[in-house]
């Protein structure tokens, strides 16, 4: 069970702060049922309610620790998703990763889509809008979490990730 003030990731909503643990005064909802009242750190205006005791079902987990974040970023060189040519299947994979708040999956997704986007630019083409939308969602959610875990500004984290991915692309081209 999480406590008031804890930072958690909550499915596709990203990083949230538990503001309160309360009951809801709504018709059809048991009066003794406890809910987490959370505020999104990505979308500050969002208030989210989630039943206590269903954290796993709702893809709710504690924000990564600094050590976990550093270990995750260390996996960047080998972190790639298998490319799915079928756009619907690719979107299904992206949606599952985002909805389950899968940090490693989002890291691999960012790397894969970014590399794909670079290839498309070299071919004189643009990245499909769907891939761009999911890239932004993965970046928003993962960078918010890593920024908190590593205690660095999001803008610095984004630059760090871009540099790491650029180094990897350069090293791969040299092979």
Image (cartoon, helix red, strand yellow):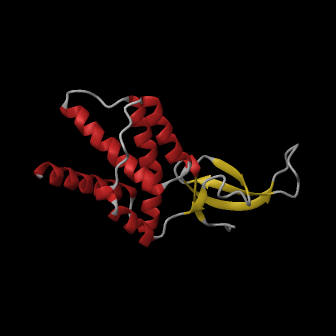
Q: Quadrant of the N terminus?
A: bottom right
| Nearer the observer, 65 or 111 | 111
Please identify the quarter of the rendering in which residue 26 is found: top right
Please identify the quarter of the rendering in which residue 156 is found: bottom left
Q: Taking 153 as reference, is 25 left or right?
A: right
Q: Taking 162 as reference, is 26 left or right?
A: right
At 28% across and 52% down in the image, what residue appears?
A: 162
> Residue 144 in the image: x percent, y percent?
46, 56
Please identify the quarter of the rendering in which residue 59 is found: bottom right
| Nearer the observer, 156 or 134 | 134
In the image, residue 27 sits, relative to residue 3, either above or below, namely above
At 67% across and 66% down in the image, what residue appears?
A: 2
Q: Could one spot residue 44 in this view of the protein? A: no
**Callout count:** 0
| Nearer the observer, 53 or 142 | 53
At 20% across and 50% down in the image, what residue appears?
A: 169
> Residue 157 in the image: x percent, y percent?
35, 58
Q: Taking 126 as reference, is 98 left or right?
A: right
Q: Residue furthest bottom?
A: 67
In the image, residue 139 sits, relative to residue 129, either above or below, namely below
Q: Could one spot residue 60 in this view of the protein? A: yes
| Nearer the observer, 74 or 49 | 74
> Residue 35 in the image: x percent, y percent?
75, 56
At 42% across and 72% down in the image, what residue appears?
A: 67
> Residue 85 in the image: x percent, y percent?
37, 32
Q: Residue furthest top?
A: 125
């Amino acid at each position: 069970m999480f406590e008031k003030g804890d930072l958690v990731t909550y499915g596709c909503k990203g990083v949230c702060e538990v503001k309160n643990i309360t009951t809801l005064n709504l018709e059809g909802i048991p009066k003794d049922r406890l809910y987490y009242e959370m505020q999104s750190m990505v979308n500050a205006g969002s208030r989210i309610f989630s039943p206590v005791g269903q954290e796993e079902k709702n893809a709710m987990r504690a924000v990564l620790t600094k050590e976990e974040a550093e270990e995750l970023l260390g996996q960047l060189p080998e972190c790639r998703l298998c490319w799915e040519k079928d756009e619907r299947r690719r979107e299904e994979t992206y949606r599952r990763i985002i909805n389950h708040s899968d940090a490693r999956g989002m890291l691999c997704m960012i790397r894969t889509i970014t590399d794909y986007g670079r290839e498309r630019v070299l071919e004189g083409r643009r990245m499909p809008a769907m891939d761009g939308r999911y890239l932004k969602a993965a970046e928003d959610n993962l960078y918010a979490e890593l920024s908190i875990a590593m205690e660095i500004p999001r803008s610095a984290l984004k630059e760090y990730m871009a540099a790491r991915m650029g180094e990897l692309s350069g090293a791969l081209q040299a092979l």
